Amino acid sequence: MTITIRQIHPTFVGDVSGVDLTRPLSHDEVAAIEAGMDQHAVLVFHDQQFTDDQQVAFSRNFGEIELAVAGNLTKENEKRLSLNFADVSNLDRDNKLLARNDRNRMFNLGNRLWHSDSSFRAVPAKYSLLSGRIVPAEGGNTEFADMRAAYDALDARTKAAIEDLVCEHSLIYSRGSMGFTELSEEERRMFRPVRQRLVRTHPVTGRKSLFLSSHIGRIIGWEIPEARDFLRDLTEHATQREFVHAHRWRQYDLVIWDNRQTMHRVRRFDDTRDVRDMRRTTIAGDGPTIAQVA
Ligand code: OGA
Ligand code: MN
C-alpha cells in the first residue's frame, strides 16, 4: 500500500488513503504524513479502529504528547481516559451522558467557539489527533479554517499593522464569552493568561498565518474594547466560508490538524441525547511563540 493524499478543499485538507495507522509505521510513512500535514494542515483518515494504546503509539511519531492537565475542570482522579487524552466526548467516567447542567458539559460547550488547541498554554499545541469512536447520526461536524489562506488574503496595510502584535490567551476569556464565569480561585490560577504572537510563521514551510483563538481576551498595549472589536473583525474575515471545511464524521475516522495553521470548532448536536465519544491526543509544540512575562 502506498499513501495517497487528495486535497478536498481549494486551499487545504487532505483525504488520505492507503495506510493502516493502528500498526507500527515505517519511517517513510511517517515522513509522508508529516509532509502532508505541512502542506494541507488537516488530514482525514477513514476506518482507523484504534485502541487507546494504538492511538498513543501512532501519535508519538510526531513528537511528545501534551498531557491533559490544567486544560479543563475535570480533576485527575475523575477522568474517564488516561492523561494522554483530552476527553472531548459528552460522557462522564462511567460512560454516562453528562447532564444538561453538568459543569463539565457547560465548560466543554466552549469547543463550539473557533479556537486553536492549547493556545492558552505558554507552549501551544502542534498537532491534534481526534479519533471518532462513537459519532452521532446527526450534527457534531468539526469545522476547520485555514489561517494561512486567511492571512494571505489580508491587505498589505492590515498585514503591516498586525505583524508584531501580541495577544493574551486564557480559558477564562473563551468561557467568559459564553457566560461561564464561575471559577474557583484555584481554577483562575490554573487558567492564568499567556501571551502569543498574532502572526506566526510555520517552521517548515515558512508560511505566515493568523494565530487567532476564542481564548484571546486582550491585545497587549490596546484598550480592551478596541482589541475585542478588531479581533472580532479579523475572526469574521478568517472564518468566511471560502477558508472553511466541514468534516462530517464517520465512525473510526481520525482527523489530524496543525494548530499552528488552522482554527477549528465543533458544531451543535443533541448532546444530552446522543453519545459522541471523541478522543484526542495532542502533540506539544516545540516552544512558546513569544517570551512569557513572569
Ligand atoms: C478538540 C475540539 C472538536 C470536536 O478536540 O480539540 O475542539 O469535534 N473538539 O469535538
Ligand atoms: Mn479543540
Image (cartoon, rainbow, N blue to C red):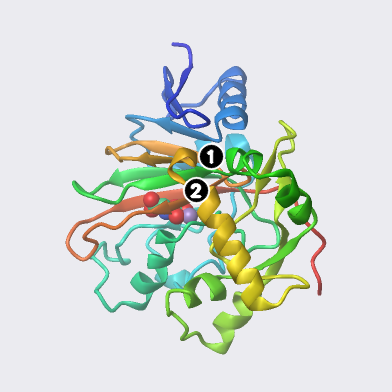
Q: Which mark is residue 281?
A: 2
State the residue lying farthest toward the top. 1
Rendered location of residue 210, percent (x, y): 64, 49
Which quadrant would residue 178 be assigned to in this image?
bottom left
The relative height of residue 219 versus residue 118 in the rendered view (above or below) is below
In the image, is 111 to the left or to the right of 97?
right
Cα distance between the residues tagged 2 and 1: 7 Å
Q: Assess whether mark 1 and mark 2 are in contact (beta carbons under 8 angstroms).
A: yes
Q: Circle 1 sits on which residue?
A: 59
Residue at the image point whose x is 74% and y is 44% from the top: 156
Residue at the image point whose x is 55% and y is 74% from the top: 173
**Which of 286 and 149 lies nearest the eye of the viewer?**
149
Sequence order check: which comes first, mark 2 or mark 1? 1
Q: Amino acid at mark 1?
A: Ser
Dot 1: what SS? helix
**Which of 208 and 60 lies nearest the eye of the viewer?**
208
In the image, is 162 to the left or to the right of 231?
right
Q: Is residue 217 visible?
A: no
Rendered location of residue 42, percent (x, y): 50, 36
Q: Amino acid at mark 2?
A: Thr
Residue at the image point whose x is 52% and y is 31% from the top: 12
